[in-house]
Image (cartoon, rainbow, N blue to C red):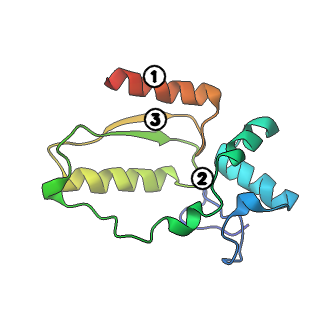
Amino acid sequence: MSTFVSASCTTLYTDVSVVAPWTSRDADTLAAFKVVMVEGATDAEFSAMLAFLQPDESLTLGTDRSQVEAGFWGRIPRTYIRHSRDRMIPVELQDRMIAEADRLAPDNPFDVHTIDAPHASNEQQFAQVVGILDSLA
């Protein structure tokens, strides 16, 4: 596996023509994707998560302008739930996104919560996310 962003974040492939690793039939690719997405999940949990992914999902992300402007953003309370074992969006990148957003709207900083979870939460971790969201209501 090749490394990018940080030492704790790994790609699943070195060939950039591979767009959707979850569509692979290669056992090693799927095993690596499982570690990155839902490390610690059972095979059944991983299979269930794969069933919800769209094969063209990665192709559409990041193609449109997604910048925010201070005058139009930061008016409502914002919450960020960090996943401390996320290898798709490492903690360092999550923290950078939070810091940049807070600089843009300093009067309305994120209310940051952290759960011990990989990128995709399992049932127990998802219950923590739901608890955080319930506390916001």
The image position of residue 33, as x and y in percent, is 72, 55
Q: How many marks?
A: 3
Give whichever of 90, 105 is nearer the camera: 105
The image position of residue 59, as x and y in percent, is 56, 69
Q: Mark 3 points at which residue?
A: 114
The image position of residue 113, as x and y in percent, is 40, 34
Residue in the picture at 45% in, 56% down? 93
- What element does badge 3 sit on? strand
Q: In which quarter of the image is the N terminus?
A: bottom right
Q: Quadrant of the C terminus?
A: top left
Q: Mark 2 points at which residue?
A: 87
Vertical side of 17 occupied by 51: above or below: above
The type of residue carrying mark 1 is Gly
Vertical side of 4 occupied by 132: above or below: above
Q: Which of marks 3 and 1 is in front?
A: 1
Residue in the picture at 69% in, 69% down? 2
The type of residue carrying mark 3 is Thr
Disc number at residue 131?
A: 1
Q: How crowded is mark 1: few (under 14 residues within 10 Å), some or many (20 or more)?
A: few
Distance (Cα) linking label 2 and label 1: 23 Å
